[in-house]
Amino acid sequence: MSGFTNSFHLQTFYREKALNLLRETELPGYVYGENNGWVTFVVDYRVKHLDDKISEFNPGILLHNVFLEDHMWEFKIYNKDELVFDYAADLEMP
């Protein structure tokens, strides 16, 4: 069985900003405590383009990390609703 990770990381010292972001998107999720100026949160909602919905309400710098063990890895950075960096790697052998 492969491991799966889909997490968001908001650049802020205030956990409440990530909580407000989830409330505004009306998505269920869990927000972790702040660590080194970043608040990590996960969303209990599996749909394509989830990051587009979340970035629509993003108050600042947001990182989105997706990792499917043995399959793919993707990393995106948003500045508010603007995608400023996008990297994806296909890990499957042809």
Image: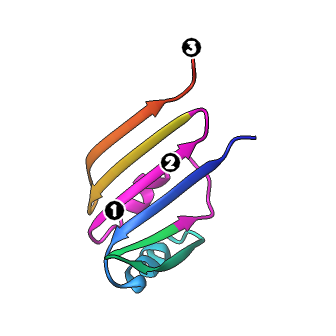
Q: Is residue 19 above or below residue 1?
A: below
Q: Mark 2 to mark 3: distance in Å?
A: 21 Å
Residue drawn 27% across and 45% down? 85
Total count of labels: 3
Mark 1 or 3: in front is 3
Q: Is residue 70 magenta?
A: yes
Start-end of magenta stretch: 42-71
Q: Which residue is mark 1?
A: 62
- Assess disc 1: are there few (<14), some (14-19) or many (≥20) residues with their C-alpha within 10 Å of its C-alpha: many
- The quadrant the N terminus occupies is top right
Mark 2 or mark 3, earlier in chain: 2
Q: Is residue 78 above or below residue 31?
A: above
Residue 86 at what x, y percent from top left?
32, 42
Q: Residue at x 40, y 65 (%)?
A: 9
Residue 71 vs residue 54, the one in the foreground: 71
Q: 13 or 44, which is in the foreground? A: 13
Residue 12, image x and y in percent?
31, 77
Question: Label 1, label 2: how many angstroms apart (C-alpha)?
Answer: 13 Å
Query: Which of the 4 image quarters holds residue 71?
Result: top right
Residue 53: percent from the left, percent from the top?
Answer: 44, 58
User: What secondary structure is found at the residue carrying circle 1?
Assistant: strand
Residue kind at label 2, given as amino acid type: Val
Secondary structure at numbered mark 2: strand
* Residue type pointed to by label 1: Leu
Quadrant (top left, top right, bottom left, bottom right) of the C terminus: top right
Extreme residue in the right direction: 1
- In percent of width and height, residue 31 lies at 52, 76
Residue labelled with disc 2: 66
Circle 3: element type:
loop
Whether residue 80 sits left or right of residue 5 in the image: it is: left
